[in-house]
Amino acid sequence: MSDNIYRNNVYSKGEAMWHNKGRVGQADETAEQVYGQMDKVAFEQVPFTLNVLGTIIPNNVLGIVRIENGKVTLVGNTRDRYQLLQPIEYIKRFDTVINKPCETLGFLGANADKLFITWNLPKVDVHGDIVKLYGMISLGFDGKYGNHLYVTEVRTICANTHARAVADATKSENQGFGANSHGAVVTTKHTQKNHLDVLGYWMKFVDEESTKQAALTQELFCRMEERALSPDEAYGFFAKVHPYPADARTYIPAELVVGEQKDVDAKMKDAKESRDLLMQLFTGSNGIEISRTLYGAYNCVTQMQNHHIMSKKNDGTESILIGARGKVMDTAFQIAVDTL
């Protein structure tokens, strides 16, 4: 499992990190104070020269580079409309707008071309079950990845948790701020001259409105926790989350059934195995204690998707982020809301 952290440039307030990199702080620190103890990261824009048979051809393509100890590293390329800002400018804006301690901060990638900063939002208390929420800004410096603001339950300390945080942000209950289909409350591009201002306005809005949104989420989750489910009702819930596919013979010509039915049978097997595992989680037969409520049934689904399903990729982040896992969790939440 790769953390993809640039050098040792990662910080966590009060909690150890699995990769044992970076620094764990105990006292409250601003993002600028945190960054002040890291290797400095800066980028430059330089013109690309197009030389054709000795003739210099004018163009508007720029290279984004890092220059350290006389070595030039190409990070990306873009056009002349790209407004390159330095990491420290976003860091200072975060401190000015949020005016709260930094929870985590880190640079990702071999060229440090991605920066994340998180801070604490109000917690959600579901009858003693505490759900922590974080605001996260994710910033790119490679000419392609823009600037994104998320609300998530996942604490980001590396590339893997960053991907999980983005996936978690797509869940319906985290989209109270009108998040888009990719989970971001807002995405700004470097081609916008005022993109830092816009990002700052949204950060302030999310931070100020989070108390109201947390109260709404807490009320909804508490209602889910108060709705008791019998094992049969839980199985019915899981059956809606993982429905059996229709028999291929009911919707395609008989001559084409064989190949299609093989796919249907595989999906049938997956759905049955998913239901069985969810029931094991719900009844506690696998050692995990989950309340026999609608909230507990929903947590069974998130537990299975995040911790029990194997992925073709070692860290599973692609499946969580763009595959079926996020869709399954969102479906489960919608079914839970409809059940209330």
Image (cartoon, rainbow, N blue to C red):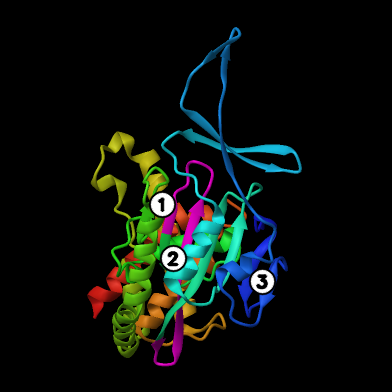
Q: Amino acid at mark 2?
A: Asp
Label 3: which residue? 17
Is residue 292 a member of the stretch shown in magenta? no
Residue 52 visible in this rendered orientation of the protein: yes
The boundaries of the magenta stretch are 125-148
Q: Amino acid at mark 3?
A: Met
Q: Residue at x 55, y 67 (%)?
A: 156
Label 2: which residue? 168
Q: Categorize mark 3 by other alpha carbons within 10 Å: few (<14), some (14-19), many (20+).
A: some
Asked if residue 95 is positioned above or below residue 140 in the image, the reply reads below
> Which percent across, then down, holds residue 337?
26, 75
Marks 3 and 1 sit apart, C-alpha to C-alpha, by: 42 Å
Residue 271 visible in this rendered orientation of the protein: no
Q: Secondary structure at mark 2?
A: helix
Q: Marks 1 and 2: CB-CB under 8 Å?
A: no
Q: Sequence-wise, which precedes: disc 3 or disc 2?
A: 3
> Which percent across, then down, holds residue 221?
34, 82
Q: Sequence-wise, which precedes: disc 1 or disc 2?
A: 2
- Type of secondary structure dominating the magenta stretch: strand
Label 1: which residue? 265
